[in-house]
């Protein structure tokens, strides 16, 4: 798999699985009925943010990640990121590879740490992956996420130094 900066030409492959993931409403805090234009504006970052894709040898987009400043001004040295893997390609190490790449790029871009503000506590695979990559749970915001099946669940704030 190759991880590279995303281009506008990648969006037609990203949108279908991004839409499926967001519409499911169980892992992302986005509006479940977000439009394609709205999703594209939120995901395809402009500098200093970045968007990446993981592609296979055929050029098929397996997953994507975006990174940006967690805050502005005095908090701009902390990065934030989001990750989505096409459900047809889970279990292949795509999320792990994307996160490792994002961490390395964030360090190269001068960030001192990375913070995830809203990891749904019932997203056990993601929580375990982020912890295996050195993230720690700083706190849980109780009942901060309305899961479509489980009701109100917590959102984790996770952190890692770079």
Image (tube, rainbow, N blue to C red):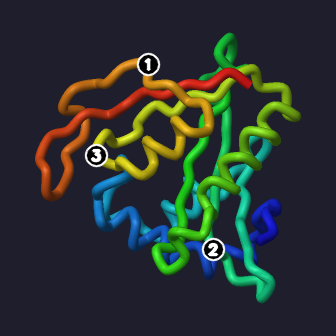
Looking at marks 2 and 1 on the same chain, the residue that comes earlier in the sequence is marked by: 2
Q: Residue at x 63, y 74 (%)?
A: 62
Quadrant position of the C terminus in the picture? top right
* Drawn side of residue 76 relative to residue 85, left or right: right
* Drawn side of residue 4 relative to residue 60, left or right: right
Distance of mark 2 from mark 1, alpha carbons? 30 Å
Q: Is residue 101 above or below residue 141?
A: below
Q: Residue at x 68, y 23 (%)?
A: 113
SS state under label 3: loop
Q: Residue at x 34, y 42 (%)?
A: 120
Q: Is residue 88 above or below residue 71?
A: below
How far across and how far down the image is residue 153, in percent?
20, 38
How far across and how far down the image is residue 36, in percent?
48, 71
Residue to which mark 3 is pinned: 122
Quadrant position of the N terminus in the picture? bottom right
Residue to which mark 2 is pinned: 62
Residue 118: name its quadrant. Answer: top left
Distance of mark 3 from mark 1, alpha carbons? 16 Å
In the rendered image, the residue lying farthest to the bottom is 58
């Amino acid at each position: 798999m190759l991880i590279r900066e995303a281009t506008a030409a990648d969006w037609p492959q990203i949108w279908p699985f991004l839409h499926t993931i967001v519409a499911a409403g169980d892992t992302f805090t986005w509006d479940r009925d977000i439009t394609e234009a709205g999703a594209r504006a939120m995901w395809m970052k402009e500098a200093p943010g970045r968007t990446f894709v993981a592609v296979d040898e055929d050029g098929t987009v397996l997953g994507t990640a975006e990174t940006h400043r967690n805050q502005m001004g005095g908090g701009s040295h902390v990065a934030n990121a989001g990750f989505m893997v096409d459900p047809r390609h889970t279990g292949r190490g795509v999320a792990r590879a994307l996160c490792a790449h994002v961490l390395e790029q964030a360090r190269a871009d001068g960030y001192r740490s990375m913070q995830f503000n809203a990891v749904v506590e019932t997203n056990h695979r993601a929580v375990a992956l982020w912890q295996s990559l050195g993230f720690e749970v700083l706190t849980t915001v109780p009942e901060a996420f309305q899961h479509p099946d489980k009701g109100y669940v917590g959102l984790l704030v996770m952190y890692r130094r770079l």
